[in-house]
Amino acid sequence: MEFPTRSSPYLPVANDLSRLMRKVMLALVPGALALFWFFGWGIVFNLLIATSTALLAEAAVLRLRGKPVRPALLDGSAALTGLLLGLALPPLAPWWIPVVGVLFAIVIAKQLYGGLGYNPFNPAMIGFVVLIISFPLQMTLWSPPTGIGHEGPGFKDTLQLVFAGRPPEGETLDTITMATPLDESKTQSGLDLTWDEILSDPRFGNYGGYGWEWVNLAFLLGGLWLWKQRAIQWHIPAGMLGGLFVISLMFYFADADGYGSPLFHLFSGATMLGAFFIATDPVSAATTPRGRLYYGAGIGILVYVIRTWGGYPDGIAFGVLLMNMAAPTLDYYTKPRVFGQREEQDD
Amino acid sequence: MQQHMVTLLEKPATFHGGLHLPAEKAQSLTGPLKSAAIPERLYVPLSQNIGEAAEPVVKTGERVLRGQLIARSLGYISAPVHAPTSGVVSDIGDYPVPHPSGLSATCIVIDSDGEDRVADSGLKMENVYLSDPADIRQRVRDAGIVGLGGAGFPTAVKLNPGPDHVVDLLVINGAECEPYISCDEALMCCRPNDIIEGIRIMRHALHAKQVVIGIEDNMPNAIDCLQKELDRLDEKDIRIVPVPTRYPAGGEKQLIYALTGEEVPSQGLPIDIGVVCHNVGTAAAIARAIHHGEPLISRVITVTGAGISEPCNLEVRIGTPIASLVEQCGGYTDEAARLLLGGPMMGFALRTDTIPVIKTSNCILAASSKELPDPPPASPCIRCAQCTDVCPVNLLPQQLYWYAFARDMEKIQDYNLFDCIECGCCAQVCPSHIPLVQYYRFAKTEIWDMEREREKSDLARRRHEARLARLEREKKALEERRARARKSLDKKPKAGDADAKKADIAAALARVKAKKTENADAVPRNTDNLTTEQRAKIDTVEQRRNGKTDGA
Ligand code: SF4
Ligand code: SF4
């Protein structure tokens, strides 16, 4: 009898790229729902536009490069990039904002570097940074976190706004948008108000900003599930949240009036989305266990620095990209000690 | 030589990484250990283990008896081969042997006469525990016993720690960790007396201070049977320690770590920390040889998988063709789609079942395509580091892969390629389905080839330069002689001086050059400072390698 041969190991595969990506997408659901709940239909449009642009762009570039299209689309990585960027964009931004951002992410940041696995920078964050630098105004178009069906713009109004750039009757862009707590805190503390004064505004909710704290909790939930599923490891989120917590605690203790509380920082803006879903993008992150911890901590600290002293309201994107640059070096200096080797041999 | 004591841990330590794999052992552990029928024709390879092949001492047409020496060992790392049954040597020639490439190698073919008449091996020993360890070692060597758990290193060598070492701990490896393989478990359940006897002999030969048997904790029956035997013998100095079931707990270094919390040095041997490790099957083989005078002519083999009608463990004569064993297990089922020798993690796939089993064969796995399917096509590495998390050696498999892929043979060694035990954990969890182990094997082969090439070219270069230097010297000497002759003729001494000086300088240069060539050899290599054991390992891996690349 004749049998086929190949190299070991032979057991059925225990793991799969597209399954991994599907898990990540599933874990995004609670956060996405929370965003939808508080910020309305704009979120849905963003996700739809971003994801379909991502798939189209990926398919087009792969075709141009003469690579097989189907398996690459099926692995889900392009769709995930689109989703992540879509979740980070303001809900009332015009339709071309997600399109431009995703095109940059997929075409430049991912495919020009060689496609999946070869990009040194997080594609979604490259897209985000391009947008926030080029279109700072459009990137502030957040609706108030009032919840759908309340005062915020409804489905039709949002549709008009996003695709035709027309605000609803009797309104202007200014009246229907509202600065995010991070934005606000930045402007306000620029006006020399103390944090207590800033926080007395009901908009700030309990600790992270009304709506935002729930959104962050939802992403945290999804992130923890992802970790439980072993789709991500704990090092990067723990490093990032730990770094952010420690540095904000230090400044908060030194001057509670001048700086936001650790809780504010942990549950505001894109902290949890960043910690569990963006910073954990494996391709552009550090890979050694210790390296991942430092990598996360670096992002956490950079996020704080940018939020507090930088020119942009949130610092996740810049923090992640800066640490992407540091990842190879981190990996090199944090090689684990190989079994049976003495400590001094492992640098 | 200074030596620190290794101590047994109260609770087994956990090594890094590893995997929980399905055991798949129950189907082959069905009944008592049966002896397989002796086939009409046996093919006994001359090379069945690491080290040099044995040399035939019989001729075609000669009658042999069971246990009679048919090929003698050559050198220290080599094992003799004995006739598995009585009959006639019908041929000595190349036949397919267990090898990933379907390679052929010299076998002694024996046509059984069906009588299985036994020869006196002269191995049997009275008063073992009063005798000289050297005498025991010699008999173990003469019995052709090699490590039955893995690569088949000659056991006598591992029973000789040398004058520099004290053996603190003798570890007996019963932690059969690979799925499907159950031959050690069957042996522990059915022949505990042989195992314990063998262990006692080894303990005596090694002057080992402590003895421990490490068994995976999912084999309660095996633990029970051995413990009963220990109780029966009132043997208090041999301990059984159940270790957590996690692949590769049966890896020598992993098991020693689990039991003692100590790491065998990278590129080193257990004896470096005062430990010697033998497999349970090897222990039983020693008892058979020393107490019953039986050389190693049979072993227990698991025949299993959904492709086998009646999976079981069989005691098999070395040289029995796999097809014959499958037949005795009810033949193939319709599902049989893949044939492996060894387990699904570290075994290798066979093209045909005509090849014989050898001393190191532990499992024949005829699997369905559901059990061992073809993997989906590989996609790019996403650097997810899941491979890092499961590597029991704490390597960075994705970096190794990267450098193997880029053929950067310097960097890959910086990342400790040679510590990789090819356990396959990394490839098993890789979401991109990259055949990582295949890359590592490829890289190892490349490096060994390169180093051998370099050795060769170094030698050639040295010869060449030596020749040039000699020619130079001769020329110089000639010139000097001429100069002297001219000087004595000519009254102008100046030119002659200059010539002589030139000659001096040239000679000095030549010397410097020669020095340099010598120094060029000082580059350290992987193949430097290897123990004979490692050297031998390289050779076999090498052999495997040559086959592997062909399959790839
Ligand atoms: S598991 Fe596979 S995909 Fe992940 S880092 Fe390792 S080699 Fe790359
Ligand atoms: S095959 Fe090598 S690199 Fe992969 S897990 Fe095993 S020891 Fe580590």
Image (cartoon, grey):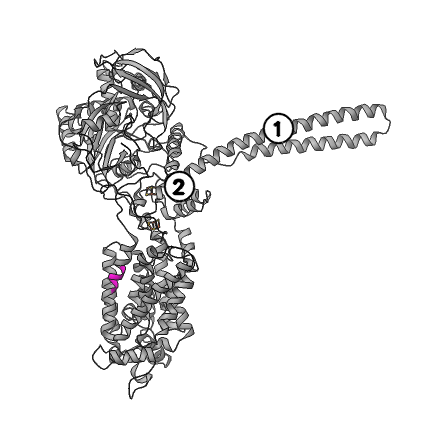
In the image, residue B394 lies in the stretch drawn in magenta: no
**Mark 1 C-beta closer than 8 Å to ligand 2:** no
Q: How far across and how far down the image is residue B467, in percent?
A: 63, 27
Ligand 2 sits in quadrant:
top left
Check contact, mark 1 vs mark 2: CB within 8 A.
Answer: no
* Circle number at residue B417: 2
Label 2, secondary structure: give it.
helix
Asked whether residue A232 appears in the rendered view, the answer is: no
Q: In which quarter of the image is residue A257?
A: bottom left
Which label's residue is closer to the chain start, 1 or 2? 2
Residue A154 higher or lower than A307, as above or below: below
* Circle number at residue B466: 1
* Circle number at residue B449: none
Q: B514 and A96: which one is in front?
A: A96
Chain letter for mark 2: B
Q: In which quarter of the image is residue B329?
A: top left
Q: How far across and how far down the image is residue B45, in percent?
A: 33, 22
Chain letter for mark 1: B
Residue A274 higher or lower than B407, as above or below: below
Q: Dominant secondary structure of the magenta stretch?
A: helix
Q: What stretch is highlighted in magenta?
A: A24-28
Q: A256 and A9: which one is in front?
A: A9
Q: How far across and how far down the image is residue A175, in percent?
A: 30, 85
Q: A253 and B499: which one is in front?
A: B499
